[in-house]
Amino acid sequence: MNRTNKNILRGGLIVFYIFIIALITLGISSLYSYLNTGADRSTMLHTEQIQERYYIPIIEWDTTSIKGRPLDATTLKSIEEDYLNAWYVRARALKNNTLTGIEDYYTANATTKVTELINFNLSNQITVAMTSLEHHPKVEFFSEDGQLIVLTDTDVLEHEQLYKEGVFLNKTSSLNTYKIILLLEDGYWRIRQFVKVSSKDRLKELSSNPLNLNLKGINYYPKSSPWDTFGTQFNKDTIATDFKIIKNAGLNSIRIFVGYEDFGKEHVSADKLEKLRVLLDQAQLADLKVLVTLFDFYGNYSVSDWTMTQQHLLQIVQTVKDHDALLGWDIKNEPDLDYSSRNKDVVESWLEHMIYRIKLIDDAHPITIGWSNTSSAAALVDQVDFVTFHYYEPLDELETALTELKTVTGLKKIAVTEYGVSSYSGIWNLMGSSEEDQANYHKEAQELLDKNKLAFMSWTLYDFESVPENVTGTYPWRRNPQKFYGFLDSRGGKKKSSFKYISQH
């Protein structure tokens, strides 16, 4: 019995020693592996935050006359990534007044300067929302050892919004030139020197494109896909048929809507762009012009989002700007409705930049903003090429409102790009209008439009079987009236009373 116990004990000790040796061997191998591999970027730096960033500025490199070592494409890509990350974390630091991420993309000396600026802002209860939208870095020098690079970044388009104690103070847009030195440390390019050498508060002068067409138009959605023109039910033949109806009714133009998320946000869908081209092709065949309303259902406007919306705009405008059916650009549908939730100054700053960006790309087509009422339409009149507003107030107040608007618009053409009345008078709107009331409304509207030489686009071609909840909400007393603004019913038949007033005769 004793001998058996000794054998068991001996066997247990052997197993224990083998286990300990295995652990030691595993530890040594892990240490060796760690020492022979570089630090993982995702653990060393705050790249999990950078990868989720919302920052894609335009960047155009000039590498035509580099002194020192040649610069290959792979190295340039790495430099660009870290350089833009540095701009991003700096903007984030100034917005939040924290140094998160700064040490990852700035050397100790450069970090000190950012720290001083943040401390100043904190002591004065200041925050700065900023972004850079366009960069033109020229590589001046690349060291022989590949550890240092000198850039001149010319005409960096920047926008800043200054807040004190959370209250908006002012905004500035400027073109600045910087001298930049970056050092390669731990496999990453960090900014060593960041010096502004010149600044221009005036941006590029851009041409104006007045509206030359006497608009007689209508807002358009296919009857089977309201607020989803370019969705799964998109059909060329349906559009062609609808456009023929519109043209035969005596109209010359339509207004359509391009959804920001629907088209893919900053990564615009090629399929959606193709559908947009098809729609424009059909409009051209029908001899109709198309006013394209951008950024439908977009509502952020914050400076940190500007490069993303800029990318969205670039892809759409560059794709169709030369199409013969294109009438012009409506930057945003009723952005004034976002004033209370997003701040009037913030919304208008975003609108100004989007106008500026379109004009840089497309200098041939007029630009407007689809304001929700005549009072709001007085904003940014010096920025747009023609002034548009929507009108759902009593018709007997239109001329007075129009007279007031003309005091600020000068010689710029004015158009009402939404107006109409619902023919719904069901249980959720017992005092609503009938089809006869709708017809009388449009008869009076056409008389007023003709009298005041006011260009128009009515709302809308069709009644709809349903309206998406994200348009009117879930309340039936809001949704149901919205279904019955059309000159044609939801089956495609003409409303006999009102259809004859779809245009001026």
Image: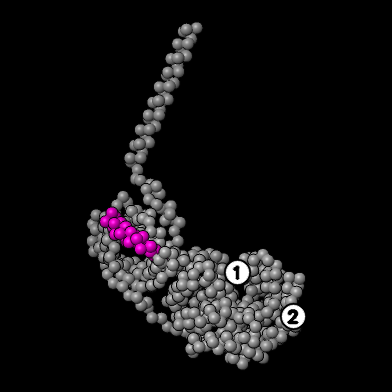
Label 1 environment density (alpha carbons within 10 Å; few <14, some 14–19, many ≥20): many
In-image side of 160 versus 218 (left or right) = left
What residue is pinned by disc 2? 435
What residue is pinned by disc 1? 230
Circle nearer the N terminus (2, 1): 1
| Residue 350 image point, x, y percent | 46, 71
**Residue 408 in view here:** yes
Name the amino acid, label 2: Glu
Q: Residue at x 42, y 64 (%)?
A: 165
Residue 82: quarter of image: bottom left
Which of 464/7 is in front?
Answer: 464
Give the residues in magenta.
107-129
Q: Residue at x 70, y 69 (%)?
A: 477
| Residue 475 image point, x, y percent | 68, 66
Vertical side of 416 occupied by 161: above or below: above
Q: CA distance from mark 2 to mark 1?
A: 30 Å
Which numbered mark, 2 or 1, is in the foreground of this view? Answer: 2
In-image side of 149 versus 447 (left or right) = left
